[in-house]
């Protein structure tokens, strides 16, 4: 698609301000260098993980929200209405930001294949402000200028949200968000960007994501794995339960906990359970209660100090019965190897 | 697009719509597992004839992505006062973009009643090959009804919505009476339930 419209505004944090000032900026000329920078910036995102998002809209039949209406104006309305929409988004972003964010440059662009095409792609960028040093060389005494009115296009703190579709009720309800500061889901898209500015949620509900993850782990356990890989899967489950981190994507889990045969089985299972590629990088909050319910019991600690670890998918290997008011566990099997650890005697 | 082309395009996607319906049904059943007073949860992909007929009747510009009940689901509950909690529960996993309680505008009329919502299709639940479907739907329809609302709605769909010929006045009045009776049954069942629960609470305290 080719950019046909772009707007830029300087946004400063104004959250909580009663009468926020209108951001400075407006329509920008799409000169070849600017077009090149924006196209390259967009192309660079293709290799990055992002998260699917869904806009919150009114359910009264209008499907309206300030963000959705603005996106549609940016893409399909006349120049004046598009400018008004961009200005509205800039003010909205400013009102969403607090002092932790720092100022930035909001760039809103619209792209299409050609003038007759019905589809549009709308991109909302935030490039954080930065200071640069500029050397002025003089014969007698050189100097360094500090350039302050600048914004970084390579900063890890830049953000992007994209939306595509036609001007119909069924489109511009979902999009994709990238936070370049988020590293493999350790920190996902900044909450002010997603919740307060875009008025959106992650596209996978927490309980749904948790169930899908459990399904994937069970599916992986059903594949032709040796016992070591099955134990790795079980260790991944225990690691997930014990982790302080709660926000994951499916890909995050595979990367963090699994490699080798178990990792491959997990990836294959993930593709089978969730064919959509983008969904596998979309984050959700792991619901521990739901996860425990879906995974089932894997670790038993007995009164005599013995612990029994049941590999995922092998729950039939143990029998748990109620006996005389207590739950009794019985397990039988052939010993594969025995180890006496140093220092544990 | 001619009717023939539209029919062919819809037939080409039907397998994936059916797979999507299955996945959505499973996800809904998992989410509602253990909740009482649910009679059934069922999802379906729209039949080809039904899609083509709707596309023609509503004169959509782009029916392949504008018809929003290509996949539809229905949750049937026992009591009317459980519709709203069910709606809220389903909102935990499905993002609604449109909601409406369908009922007659005229307070003296009785006919079809049902809660309808239009929900974004979660990409994580779409089947393999879904992204290859051109002009694919982005939403599906989700209804919540009581048993009595459903019993009336199914008969009405057969006799009134697609009648073999124009209905006579007496026939229309009888069908309206059934709708009123269904409404009344829901109303009285709700009152009886409230009364019973109130007496249970009194006994417990």
Image: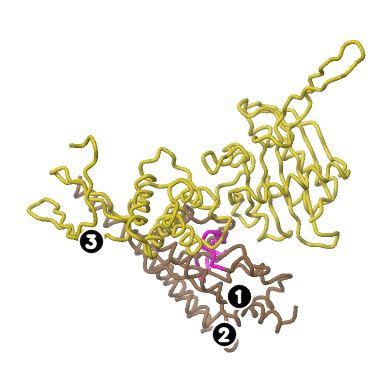
Residue B84 shows in this picture: no
Q: Residue furthest top?
A: A140
Query: What residue is at 46 percent from the left and 64 percent from the top?
Result: B144
Which residue is nearer to you in this view: B12 or A15?
Answer: B12
Residue A302 x %, y %: 16, 46
Q: Quadrant of residue A2?
A: bottom right
Indicate yes or no whether the magenta region holds residue A277. no
Residue numbers of the magenta segment: B102-128
Indicate yes or no whether the magenta region holds residue B107. yes
Whole-Å distance between the Cαs marked 2 and 1?
29 Å
Residue that numbered label 1 is attached to: B13
Q: Residues within 10 Å of mark 1 (few under 14, many from 20)?
A: some
Which label was assigned to residue A130?
A: none
Q: What colour scheme governs how the chains and residues are painted in the rendered image of this protein?
A: by chain
Name the secondary structure under disc 2: loop
Question: Which chain contains the residue that carries disc 3?
Answer: A
Look at the picture and state if A48 lies above or below A220.
above
Residue that numbered label 3 is attached to: A317
Name the secondary structure under disc 1: helix
B181 horizontally vs B140: left or right:
left
Which of pointers 1 and 3 indicates the residue nearer the eye? 3
Q: Which chain appears yellow?
A: A
Whole-Å distance between the Cαs marked 1 and 3?
43 Å
């Amino acid at each position: 698609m080719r950019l046909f419209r772009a707007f830029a505004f300087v946004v400063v944090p104004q959250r909580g301000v009663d009468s926020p000032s209108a951001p400075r900026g407006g329509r920008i000329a799409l000169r070849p260098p600017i077009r090149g920078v924006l196209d390259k910036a967009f192309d660079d995102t293709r290799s990055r993980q992002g998260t699917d998002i869904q806009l919150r809209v009114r359910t009264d039949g209008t499907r309206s929200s300030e963000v959705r209406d603005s996106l549609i104006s940016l893409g399909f309305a006349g120049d004046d209405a598009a400018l008004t929409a961009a200005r509205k988004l800039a003010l909205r972003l400013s009102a969403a930001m607090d002092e932790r964010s720092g100022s930035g440059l909001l760039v809103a662009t619209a792209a299409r294949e050609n003038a007759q095409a019905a589809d549009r792609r709308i991109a909302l960028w935030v490039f954080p402000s930065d200071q640069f040093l500029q050397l002025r060389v003089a014969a007698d005494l050189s100097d360094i200028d500090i350039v302050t009115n600048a914004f970084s296009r390579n900063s890890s703190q830049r953000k992007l949200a994209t939306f595509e579709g036609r001007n119909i009720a069924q489109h511009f309800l979902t999009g994709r968000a990238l936070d370049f500061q988020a590293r493999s889901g350790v920190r996902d898209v900044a909450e002010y960007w997603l919740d307060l500015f875009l008025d959106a949620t992650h596209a996978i509900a927490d309980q749904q994501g948790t169930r899908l993850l459990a399904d994937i782990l069970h599916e992986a356990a059903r594949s032709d794995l040796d016992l070591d890989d099955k134990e790795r899967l079980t260790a991944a489950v225990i690691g997930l339960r014990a982790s302080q981190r709660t926000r994951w994507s499916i890909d995050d889990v595979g990367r963090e906990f699994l490699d080798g045969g178990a990792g491959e089985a997990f990836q294959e299972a993930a593709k089978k359970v969730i064919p959509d590629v983008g969904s596998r990088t979309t984050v959700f909050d792991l619901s521990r209660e739901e996860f425990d319910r879906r995974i089932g019991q894997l670790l038993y600690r007995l009164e005599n100090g013995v612990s029994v670890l049941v590999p995922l998918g092998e729950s039939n290997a143990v029998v748990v019965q109620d006996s005389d008011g207590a739950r009794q566990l019985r397990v039988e099997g052939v010993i594969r190897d025995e180890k006496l650890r140093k220092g544990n005697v | 697009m001619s009717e023939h082309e539209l029919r062919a395009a819809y037939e080409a996607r039907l397998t994936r719509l059916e797979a999507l319906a299955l996945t959505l049904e499973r996800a809904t059943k998992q989410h509602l597992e253990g909740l009482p007073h649910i009679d059934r949860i069922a999802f379906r992909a729209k039949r080809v004839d039904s899609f083509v007929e709707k596309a023609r009747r509503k004169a959509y510009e782009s029916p392949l992505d504008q018809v929003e009940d290509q996949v539809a689901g229905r949750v049937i509950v026992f009591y009317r006062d459980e519709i709203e909690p069910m709606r809220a529960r389903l909102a935990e996993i499905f993002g609604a973009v449109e909601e409406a309680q369908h009922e007659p505008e005229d307070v003296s009329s009785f006919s079809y009643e049902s809660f309808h919502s239009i929900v974004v299709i979660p990409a994580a639940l779409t089947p393999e090959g879904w992204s290859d479907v051109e002009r694919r739907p982005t939403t599906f329809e989700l209804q919540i009804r009581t048993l009595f609302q459903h019993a009336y709605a199914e008969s009405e769909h057969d006799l009134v919505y697609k009648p073999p010929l124009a209905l006579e006045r007496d026939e229309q009045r009888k069908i309206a009476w059934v709708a009123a009776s269904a409404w009344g049954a829901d109303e009285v069942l709700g009152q009886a339930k409230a009364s019973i629960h109130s007496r249970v609470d009194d006994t417990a305290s």
